[in-house]
């Protein structure tokens, strides 16, 4: 593989350039002609399909159903919940014409579907018998990004899912918020192998229009903190303006309680950053488009024939075992070139079959994460592959977990706070008086905001990190992308 | 079930009203606040998911991969292929602002993705080794509908798939067009049970920018003809303006050959029209969200307990057999009410369990399509259900096939043509001289256009139906929605 095709910078030396090169060169995504928009290429799309299928199964098990709502939202409808409108309007793409004809009312291109969905919910919900309503939409949303864009992490259009549920009581909505947050944690930790912290957002950082927002946060290798998914209790903030009422079990009329929650293709960005290395991607097995690549090695025509036959046999064996496998017998590339390409693409295991393997009735397995090689008897291959995949999962998660643990710093002093933020980044655990002005000043002076307040309130260990007054909560501060 | 909930008109008496009532009352879709846009509700979405999964498996088996391209297309890019732009521009939704800021260049909301995709293809394709490129996108497209809208059949936004492939030669592109047309036929005939005719479109009716368009057409119960899916050979009409070139096997540079093809949620509309009856939907088993609904029948508490237990047992048995089944033991509704509701929703088989069934160790199976009842021993239930599902499929397809056959009329005389079109509709098989003016005049005078010219050229049996000159092809005329 030529220099041009492989990654030309080290992850530890120029993280941002490394990230972009991995995204483009591993063919996960490409820039499009419009600034801020990317094309999700087949290899990236296959990862998204895996993530989608995993989460779709999880929520369907709990009784959620999918639906599709229109892409456009009339301006008057978007305005119905005032805070929500104010929050979204600066980044809305507006449709003003069809063909040459101006529209009577501007149409917002969906920045999120609360308003368009809840106009329908108001029609559909009449009685407690219609509740809970548990819907989810897989679609794309559009928010003009003014800041510099980064593939998967910050783009003007992104693929996501948005859940929108309706309940009889606040308690039911609370429970929904938490069970979804837990599903997100399982998806992110058990499948994407990225450890996260669970918490609440501060009022300043919560979703516009929500009663409260819960979040999962992860720390990337450069010390920046990434929001991985959020789950909101909307209270009755939307049901009142949208008139979502139901006749309760006691025959009286009530406004409903609602939640909304979402994760996006940003998870792919987090996965790249967390696990990749100087050679390129390392994809966690459960979301990998391919678990295994088989590469034949031979030095003459006779060997070629034998090795190819064995390669097909091995392919069939692994394929039958429901492993995602490819047999790369392209003739126009050397084995070395193929090694590099599939390493760049992060396939967890490489199977090499050469003349010596053939003679010994063995195959060689090579781990992407550690480069370790194991020679195994062919008859044990499938079970050995399964074992290796588990080991890779353990190793990737353990490494990421150690990084997260090392990225949490307890601070009591504002000078130390600033010093640590600049030198190490990560999450700074500090006490806060809960006055918005302190949160705001810290953001202005350091660029850090409150990433989360732990779900389980932690014990206050100092005065407010900023003003020195009595503190009321422990908060985790950090710089986001 | 009250009158208001059930369908209040007969399919044979007011087809259009019947259709709308089925869509809305079976909760497949709902109108949205914006004219011409619908909400796809969970029951309708589940049918779309089934259609999507079936077709997605088919194309992946042939090596196609999914990707996602941006929703917006800059005006200058949409203009690159002139015919294409002229064809789409009157119905394009234009984005002109983000927030309060006017854009430098208008952005078209995706009416179809040829232009945005091919700008990327030009970057990605360099050598014959990069071909064929076989991509597919599942997304929604937007085309402002000026005519009256009809859920699923004619809406300003619709869900669909669009395939976009690139090949070395015209022959390869021809083959791709035909193999996709055949996949569409399989999907539509074998899964949706709607018989279709295969053919070419005339130059007037072909896709704007295509070399030629192939199509599948079905006749609905009201005699109107519905285009079910199209597959286009784009020739080099796009590769030239978009500069999609490759180095061939001989080392020389060539423009690539391309195809594009699509089916949409319109298939759901065709399915409703074709199979439904005065009670509501009848959903073909292979795309039905539910195969079976189990309804318990009892007259006292003691019976209730026993029947409920048996109901759960039966549910588990059917569920384990991988049948899609629901046990409707809601207490707030009577069995009669439930019968009507699930008939409206078109579930192929109803299982009734009453005290007498219990005593005899039997269950009662009721077919949705014929209302036939069978009492079967419980131990034979699963195999009997499978048999019934097959029978339902056969019956639905046979009825639809008979309708199609009865809807094709051979005509040699223009007066008869007009008379038949008005009295029966359907497809009028007539000879044509291939002059565009005759096609245009027929359309103006009768409202019928050429739906298809058979793939296998049929023998000319008269002079041109319009001008009386020598005819060169047999064409099928009809009125579309």
Image: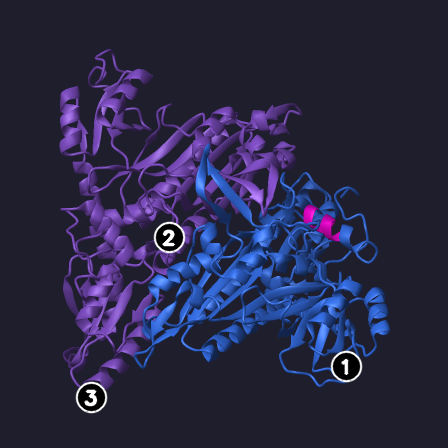
Chain colours: A purple, B blue
Q: Residue A204, percent across and down?
A: 36, 24
Residue at x 14% of width, y 62% of height: A372
Q: Are marks 1 and 2 in contact (CB under 8 Å)?
A: no
Q: Which residue is mark 3?
A: A302
Secondary element under disc 1, as helix, strand or loop, is loop
Is residue B315 among the parts visible in the rendering?
no
Q: Which residue is mark 2?
A: A32
Q: Residue A181, percent across and down?
A: 39, 37
Q: Is residue B407 above or below residue A68?
A: below
Question: Looking at the magenta stretch, what is its main secondary structure?
Answer: helix
Residue at x 61% of width, y 27% of height: A243
Q: Are marks 3 and 1 on the same chain?
A: no
Q: 10 Å neighbourhood of mark 3: few (<14), some, or many (≥20)? A: few
Q: Are marks 3 and 2 in contact (CB under 8 Å)?
A: no
User: What's the chain of the residue with tag 2?
Assistant: A
Which image quarter holds the C terminus of chain B? bottom right
- The stretch of residues the image draws in magenta is B18-24
Please tell me which residue lies in front, B43 or B460. Answer: B460
Q: Residue A290, percent across and down?
A: 31, 63
Residue at x 86% of width, y 72% of height: B415
Q: Is residue B23 one of those drawn in magenta?
A: yes
Identify the image quadrant of residue A413. top left
State how far apart marks 3 and 2 are (Cα): 47 Å
Please tell me which residue lies in front, A196 or B375. Answer: A196
């Amino acid at each position: 593989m030529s220099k041009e095709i492989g990654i030309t910078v080290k992850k530890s030396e120029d993280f941002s350039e490394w990230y972009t090169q991995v995204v483009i060169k591993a063919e996960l995504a490409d820039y499009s002609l419009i600034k801020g928009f990317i094309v999700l290429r087949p290899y990236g799309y296959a990862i998204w399909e895996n993530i989608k299928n995993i989460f779709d199964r999880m929520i369907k098990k709990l009784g959620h159903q999918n639906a599709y709502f229109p892409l456009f939202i009339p301006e008057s409808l978007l305005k119905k919940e005032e805070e929500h409108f104010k929050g979204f309007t600066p980044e809305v793409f507006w449709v003003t014409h069809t063909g040459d004809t101006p529209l009577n009312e501007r149409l917002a291109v969906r920045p999120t579907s609360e308003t368009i969905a809840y106009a329908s919910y108001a029609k559909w919900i009449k009685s407690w018998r219609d509740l809970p309503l548990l819907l989810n939409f897989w679609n794309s949303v559009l928010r003009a990004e003014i800041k510099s864009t980064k593939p998967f992490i910050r783009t003007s259009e992104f693929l996501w899912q948005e859940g929108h549920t309706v309940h009889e009581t606040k308690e039911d909505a609370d429970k929904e918020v938490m069970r979804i947050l837990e599903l997100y944690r399982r998806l992110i930790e058990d499948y994407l192998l990225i450890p996260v912290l669970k918490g609440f957002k501060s009022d300043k950082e919560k979703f516009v229009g929500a009663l409260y927002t819960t979040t999962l946060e992860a720390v990337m290798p450069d010390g920046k903190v990434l929001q991985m998914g959020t789950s909101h209790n909307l209270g009755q903030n939307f049901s009142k303006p949208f008139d979502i009422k139901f006749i309760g079990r006691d025959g009286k009329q009530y406004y409903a309680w609602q939640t909304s929650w979402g994760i996006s293709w940003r998870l792919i960005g987090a996965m790249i950053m967390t696990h990749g290395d100087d050679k390129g991607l390392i994809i966690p097995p459960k979301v990998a488009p391919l678990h295994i690549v088989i590469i034949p090695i031979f030095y003459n025509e006779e060997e070629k024939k034998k090795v190819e036959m064995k390669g097909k046999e091995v392919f069939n064996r692994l394929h039958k075992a429901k492993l995602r496998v490819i047999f790369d017998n392209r003739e126009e590339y050397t084995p070395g070139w193929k090694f590099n390409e599939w390493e760049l693409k992060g396939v967890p295991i490489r199977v090499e079959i050469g003349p010596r393997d053939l003679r010994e009735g063995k195959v060689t397995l090579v781990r992407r994460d550690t480069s370790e090689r194991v020679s195994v008897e062919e008859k044990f291959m499938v079970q050995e592959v399964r074992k290796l995949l588990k080991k890779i999962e353990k190793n990737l998660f353990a490494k990421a977990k150690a990084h997260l643990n090392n990225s949490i710093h307890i601070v009591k002093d504002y000078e130390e706070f600033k010093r640590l933020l600049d030198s190490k980044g990560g999450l700074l655990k500090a006490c806060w008086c809960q006055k918005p002005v302190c949160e705001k000043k810290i953001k202005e002076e350091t660029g850090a905001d409150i990433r989360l307040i732990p779900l389980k309130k932690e014990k206050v260990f100092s005065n407010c990190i900023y003003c020195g007054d009595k503190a009321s909560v422990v908060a985790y501060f950090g710089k986001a992308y």
